[in-house]
Image: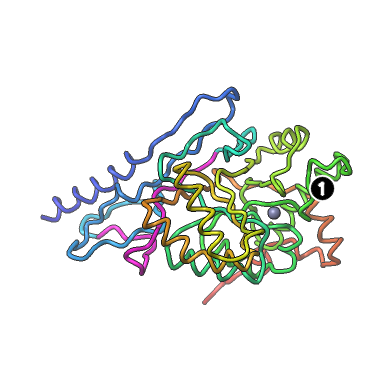
């Protein structure tokens, strides 16, 4: 009996590993690959009493560390209290080598979403409206990608920490929301907007951000694309623009997103966590996505971004912070006994 149960557990692990699927699309750039699915919730039945419905799992990683001890149930990494939550249907990992672009509005190479799949993205935070967005995402046990502004991250580092702590992916959206295609910006200023933005987010998080970037107002030019490519930073446009920043109320945002989605069938949705109406619209919008059969794909980076030391140091100097501020808390204060 004990052996049989151990075998069953081993099968579950095997099924989970087999569930990891590669998606490749043809691309003129040989160094850019579509994201890799690392988890599929459906493929992971747990050996627990199944009398009541199993709630959607938040985030399931397939890793070598997942081991099944004979006789011990496989522990769920996290649980979701909402049995009818939108959840996360799959998690993809992006190899950002060469700076792949996502979002068909501008980048049409990597078509990795299948019908009814969406990616939730939020720009311009962290802001006092962000915790409300986080609360709604948590209630629906779902995950998003955030593109914070560097300056805002220096105003509200504790809010940005909450975003990362909730398991969302944190990229960047420049230092000061400058439009990088502006002829007024020199090459050095474009580089500074990009690098200082990432450095500010690292300073707020106490950890390296994901090498994910969204251009302010989706405005890019060849020089900025080349630079991001040279830094192996993925670029995000969108498929579904919510136009939340110019919507008069929550209802208009919901209507815009659902109308476009029902027409296009899938896509990366662009919203702003600093918009009050967006925070108000989100509970209903996520319910509508669930009711419409849409599934959320979570995008993560294969590796985090190494920020450039000169921009980290320049930021500390600008903010008149002591140099020690650039060190993560864990490297300053360590628990040696508890
Ligand atoms: Zn923006």
Quadrant showing the N terminus:
bottom left
Q: Give the answer, above or below, for where 221 lies relative to 120.
A: above
Residue wearing tag 1: 192
- Point 42% across, 44% down: residue: 38
- Point 71% across, 60% down: residue: 203
Magenta segment boundaries in residue numbering: 73-94
Q: Give the answer, above or below, for where 142 lies relative to 186.
A: below
Q: Looking at this view, is 67 or 152 the one in front? A: 152
Give the total number of marks visible in the rendering: 1
Q: Give the answer, above or below, for where 110 lies relative to 263.
A: above
Q: Quadrant of residue 189?
A: top right
Q: Quadrant of residue 54?
A: bottom left
**Percent of width and height locating residue 171:** 63, 51
Q: Give the answer, above or below, for where 221 lies relative to 304.
A: above
- Point 65% across, 70% down: residue: 158
Q: Write down which quadrant ligand 1 falls in.
A: bottom right
> Main SS of the magenta segment?
loop
């Amino acid at each position: 009996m004990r052996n049989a149960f151990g075998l069953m557990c081993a099968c579950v692990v095997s099924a989970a590993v087999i569930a990891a699927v590669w998606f490749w699309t043809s691309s003129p750039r040989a160094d850019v690959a579509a994201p890799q699915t690392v988890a599929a919730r459906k493929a992971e039945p747990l050996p627990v009493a199944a009398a009541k419905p199993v709630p959607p799992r938040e985030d399931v990683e397939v890793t070598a560390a997942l081991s099944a001890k004979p006789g011990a149930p496989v522990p769920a990494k996290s649980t979701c209290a909402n049995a009818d939550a939108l959840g996360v249907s799959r998690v993809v990992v992006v190899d950002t080598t060469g700076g792949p672009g996502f979002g068909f509005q501008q980048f049409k190479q990597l078509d990795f979403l299948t019908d009814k799949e969406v990616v939730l993205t939020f720009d311009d935070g962290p802001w006092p409206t962000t915790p409300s967005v986080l609360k709604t995402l948590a209630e629906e046990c779902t995950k998003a990608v955030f593109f914070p502004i560097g300056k805002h991250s220096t105003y509200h580092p504790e809010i940005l920490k909450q975003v990362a702590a909730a398991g969302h992916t944190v990229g960047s959206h420049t230092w000061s929301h400058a439009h990088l295609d502006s002829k007024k910006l020199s090459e050095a200023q474009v580089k500074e907007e990009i690098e200082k933005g990432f450095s500010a987010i690292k300073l707020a998080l106490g950890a390296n951000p994901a090498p994910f970037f969204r251009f302010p107002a989706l405005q890019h030019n060849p020089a900025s694309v080349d630079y991001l490519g040279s830094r192996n930073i993925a670029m995000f446009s969108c498929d579904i623009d919510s136009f939340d920043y110019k919507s008069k109320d929550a209802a208009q945002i919901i209507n815009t997103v659902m109308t476009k989605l029902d027409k296009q069938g899938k896509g990366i949705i662009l919203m702003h966590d600093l918009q009050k109406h967006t925070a108000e619209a989100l509970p209903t919008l996520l319910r509508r996505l669930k009711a419409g059969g849409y599934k959320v794909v979570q995008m993560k980076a294969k590796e985090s971004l190494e920020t450039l030391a000169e921009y980290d140091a320049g930021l500390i100097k600008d903010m008149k912070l002591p140099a020690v501020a650039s060190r993560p808390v864990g490297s300053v204060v360590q628990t040696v006994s508890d």
